[in-house]
Image (cartoon, helix red, strand yellow):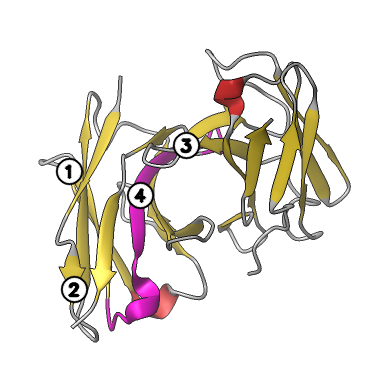
Amino acid sequence: QVQLQESGPGLVKPSQTLSLTCTVSGGSISSGGYYWSWIRQPAGKGLEWIGRVYPSGSTNFNPSLKSRVTFSVDTPKNRFSLQLSSVTAADTALYYCARSSNSLDAFDVWGQGTMVTVSS
Amino acid sequence: QSALTQPASVSGSPGQSITISCTGTSSDVGAYSDVSWYQHHPGKAPKLMIYDVSNRPSGVSNRFSGSKSGNTASLTISGLQAEDEADYYCSSYTSLSTWVFGGGTKLTVL
């Protein structure tokens, strides 16, 4: 059974870059047909899709965040990462990683989430 | 892209049925069958309840059902149980090759 686990600093200073990693266990990140997404939830608000990466490197982004987001995939370590630059307090949120696929166009596996606070 | 529109809250008594609506546009909900629903208990990971408008993943109770008409998708929960109390989110694929979520609906079981 595939499981996802987010990790990274819980506190980031304004204007700096937020970096998170999602480690995949119970399956290979490079097995065909799966996309790997980042989704966030500010306190008291709804879910916001940040973007997704395919192991080949193909990406899609939320237009509102595209200019600040970078994804990477580390196949040997079975993990993928998010970098969000020039953060502000508005980027304070619970960040989730999740899996979707071509055959099941929905997010069927989620991490537990990691809280990131942007504050000086 | 704008978030899909969901009611902020719905409520029902045990055993009753409730329906949560999710309204988008002709560029997302209206254009694709890639509409899904998630149950979210605070502090836990969201759980996929419905995908492709009306399909249930293995292990999800058949009390949960989904449908779509035009730009509006709906989640119906029948035979409400206490453990159904949670936040529910809809999601849709969009014409920009992105995903968009609804603002979430808090379900209270009275």
Tell me the residue that label 2 is attached to.
Answer: A12
Tell me the residue that label 4 is attached to.
Answer: A96
Q: Is residue A55 magenta?
A: no
Residue B86, by quadrant, is: top right
Residue at 28% across, 29% down:
A3
Please say if B61 is above or below A62. Answer: above
Helix, strand or loop for disc 2: strand
Mark 2 against mark 1, which lies toward the viewer? Answer: 2
Q: Are marks 4 and 1 on the same chain?
A: yes
Label 2 or label 1, whichever comes before in sequence order = 2
In this image, B103 relative to A2: left or right?
right
| Chain letter for mark 1 | A
Q: Are marks 4 and 2 on the same chain?
A: yes
In the rendering, which numbered label is found on residue B41?
3
In this image, A19 relative to A43: left or right?
left
Q: Amino acid at mark 3?
A: His
| Chain letter for mark 4 | A
Tell me the residue that label 1 is attached to.
Answer: A75
* Residue stretch rendered in magenta on the structure: A85-106
Q: Amino acid at mark 4?
A: Tyr
